[in-house]
Image (tube, rainbow, N blue to C red):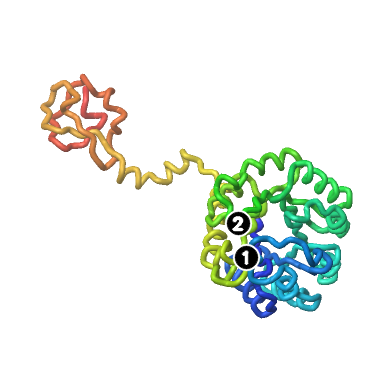
Amino acid sequence: MKTSIIAEIGNTHEGSVGLAKCFIKAAAECGVDAVKFQTHIFDAESLPNAPQPPYFNEESRKDYFERTAFNLEQHIALKACAEDHGVEFISSPFSCEALELLERAGVKTYKIPSGEVTNIPLLEGIGATGKPVLLSSGMSSWAELDAAVQALKDSRSGGVTLLQCSSIYPCPADKVGLNVLDEMRSRYGLPVGLSDHTLGFYASLAAVANGATVVERHFTLSRKMYGSDARHSLEPSELRQLVDEIRDLESAMQHPVDKDRAACQLAQMKTTFEKSIVACENIQKGSKITQAMLAFKKPGNGLPPARRRDILGKAAARDIRANEKLTEEDFL
């Protein structure tokens, strides 16, 4: 099965439709399957005096989300841009009002971010659309995930994929939680994936090798861009490399190798690199063969070294010169 690779653009577009389209085009050129945005309506999702994350230190959360928010027409335009470039447009609604906006925009898949897992009314609304859902798990306990999955099932969601996620930026290796993929699969019987916040490729590749059907990575045109996500994101050349390596890994996993058949196909190479039994000195006819008379040298089109014991102690049937390859007919 082909892994769905999602480029998480989030709000790094700075509220510019033109820049967001550049992100979409660049991500599509990297070979991803989907681009993901975030749909924030600040007054619908947050109180004005709600505490701010530590990375909002240059402007208020309210100012940032209002400055970077897109309206319905802009969502429609970005969705059309994504489709023109052959990728799916996905967004995470952070409120029921945001969900309504995305429904009007015609979004086909929803991503539930880690902070919304306990927002059961939102989950029920998303599930009621009957569309596929990606459920991130970065902040959740098992009990909270149990409730979220049940809410989506009860509301007749169009299918749920659970994403292991560690809400740490960047995520160190010892916090990735690859073991959770198997636990999720066993606990819920649902497809699983990884929302990868590491700075390398290893976690994404390991997840694919462990059956992940989705890999999500934060994406930016440059890590020097403004905002909290850019410095922890992959740049285009890195995302392209990751996509290529995931596709190569999939190919390797989907094509088992028959060792015997492969060895037959490498007959010419085997002759070039393997060795044969040769005389390391002149051997007179009638002499009994000893180990001291033998050497093992390329090419490998004579008696193989594994036959050495078969000829020790036998008499030479002819005079054999040093560096001659030995044959079955050379012994009595």
Do the residues bearing badges 1 and 2 touch, measured as CB atoms within 8 Å?
yes
Between residues 299 and 105, which one lies in front from this camera angle? 105
User: Mark 1: which amino acid?
Assistant: Ser
Q: Which residue is mark 2?
A: 169
Classify residue 184 by image quadrant: top right
Q: Position of residue 69 (x, y in %)?
A: 75, 73
Dot 2 alpha-carbon crowd within 10 angstroms: few under 14, some 14 to 19, many 20 or more: some
Q: Residue at x 81, y 47 (%)?
A: 149
Q: Position of residue 285 (x, y in %)?
A: 12, 26
Can residue 311 be spotted in the picture? yes
Q: Earlier in the sequence, mark 1 or mark 2?
A: 2
Can residue 1 be spotted in the picture? no
Between residues 230 and 238, which one lies in front from this camera angle? 230
Above or below, comparing residue 69 to residue 5 in the picture: below
Dot 1 alpha-carbon crowd within 10 angstroms: few under 14, some 14 to 19, many 20 or more: some
Q: Which residue is mark 1?
A: 228
Query: From the viewer's perspective, is 311 left or right of 84?
Result: left
Above or below, comparing residue 199 to residue 331 in the picture: below
Above or below, comparing residue 283 to residue 125 in the picture: above
